[in-house]
Image: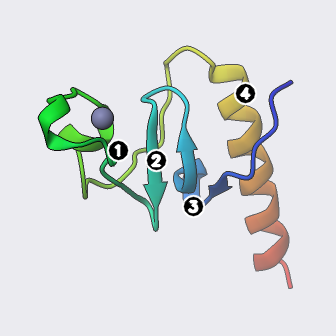
Amino acid sequence: MRTSNNEYGENGRLMNGYDYDRQAWVENGRYVCCGHPETMQCRCYGRLHEGEETVNNKGMTGVSNASLIIATSWARQAARRGK
Ligand SMILES: [Zn+2]
């Protein structure tokens, strides 16, 4: 099982960390530019989608991992609301 320091927000949205599916860094729930020099003319997701909000990815590969995280985050939220 792969471990990471990724932080997930409501509904399992990636808020801070690395989006492995899209190979892009995320800060405050938004994709950030890959940081490659512009001369590289790379097609990184982070460059093409810089500033876009992350989405809750469902129905994609790696769902088992993602849904586990979603389930965990929902359980945490439910526990918080219960107080
Ligand atoms: Zn790049």
> Which label was assigned to residue 25?
2
Callout 4 environment at 10 Å: few (<14), some (14 to 19), or many (20+)?
few
Q: Residue at x 68, y 33 (%)?
A: 67
The residue lying at 74 percent from left, 67 percent from top is 77
The amino acid at mark 4 is: Asn
* Camera-nearest label, 2 or 3: 2
Q: Which mark is residue 50?
A: none
Looking at marks 4 and 3 on the same chain, the residue that comes earlier in the sequence is marked by: 3
Q: Kindly identify the residue that appears in the image at 72 percent across and 55 percent down.
A: 74
Dots 4, 1 in contact, CB < 8 A: no
- Give residue 34's mark: 1
Q: Residue at x 33, y 48 (%)?
A: 35
Mark 1 crowd level (few <14, some 14–19, many ≥20, 10 Å Cα): some
Q: Which mark is residue 10?
A: 3
Q: Picture coordinates of residue 78 (x, y %)?
A: 77, 66
Residue 65: % across, % down: 72, 27
Q: Nearer the viewer, mark 3 or mark 1?
A: 1
Is disc 1's CB within 8 Å of ligand 1? yes
| Residue at image mark 4 | 65
Front position among marks 1 and 2: 1
Residue 62, x across and y down, in percent: 63, 19
* Residue type, label 1: Cys
As helix, strand or loop, the secondary structure at mark 1 comes to loop
26 lies above or below 55 = below
**Sooner in the amino-acid sequence: mark 4 or mark 1:** 1
